Amino acid sequence: QVQLVESGGGLVQPGGSLRLSCAASGSIFSRYAMGWYRHSPGKQRDLVAEITSGGSTNYADSVKGRFTISRDNAKNTVSLQMNSLKPEDTAVYYCNAAGEENGMIYWGKGTLVTVSS
């Protein structure tokens, strides 16, 4: 079992930056691939970025060069640094954990990011 709690969302102006964090507890964090997804009204929940237990990363085309995902296995946290934010980045951002050995999937409750002037 893995519990995920996101933080760091809020209101930011276009061009600004935010850093999201996800604190994980429960199972062995280092055995999970971690990801950030987002869901905006009228759209499906889409992958933003993901990082494997080995540190390999993958990004949605729309955020490449602007967002950076990182993890700290000692602190059981995964972060998403978001720069050059655009109004279309407005969404609820969800932390995701996917067990690389057991295939289990866990979600946080989400944190709202609003990019607006």
Image (cartoon, rainbow, N blue to C red):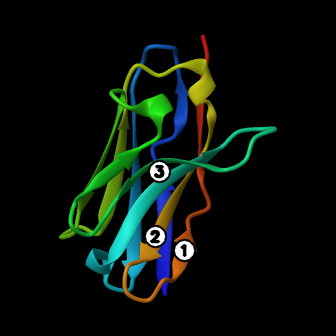
Q: Nearer the viewer, mark 3 or mark 1?
A: 1
Q: Nearer the viewer, mark 3 or mark 2?
A: 2
- The image position of residue 94, as x and y in percent, is 56, 54
Q: Which residue position is annotated with label 2?
A: 97
> What is the secondary structure assignment of the residue under circle 3?
strand
- The image position of residue 9, as x and y in percent, is 51, 40
Task: Tell me: residue 47, above or below residue 62.
Answer: below
Of the numbered discs in the image, which one, if any, rests on residue 15?
Answer: none
Write the residue at 30% across / 80% down.
31
Which residue occupies the extreme left position in the image?
74
Kindly identify the amino acid type of the residue bearing the numbered disc 3: Ser
Q: Are marks 3 and 1 in contact (CB under 8 Å)?
A: no
Write the residue at 26% across / 69% down.
53
**How many angstroms separate mark 2 from mark 1 (CA)?**
5 Å
Task: Tell me: residue 107, above or below residue 14.
Answer: below
**How many angstroms separate mark 3 from mark 2 (CA)?**
16 Å
* Earlier residue among tags 3 and 2: 3
Q: Nearer the viewer, residue 42 or 58?
A: 58
Kindly identify the amino acid type of the residue bearing the numbered disc 2: Ala
> What is the secondary structure assignment of the residue under circle 1?
strand
> What is the secondary structure assignment of the residue under circle 2?
strand
Q: Within 10 Å of the Cα at label 1, are there few (<14), some (14-19), or many (20+) other Cα atoms?
A: some
* Earlier residue among tags 3 and 1: 3
Q: Within 10 Å of the Cα at label 3, are there few (<14), some (14-19), or many (20+) other Cα atoms?
A: some
Write the residue at 44% across / 58% down.
35
Q: Which residue position is annotated with label 3?
A: 7
Write the residue at 38% across / 32% down.
64
Q: Which residue position is annotated with label 1?
A: 106
**How many angstroms separate mark 3 from mark 1 (CA)?**
16 Å
Kindly identify the amino acid type of the residue bearing the numbered disc 1: Tyr
Q: Quadrant of residue 65?
A: top left
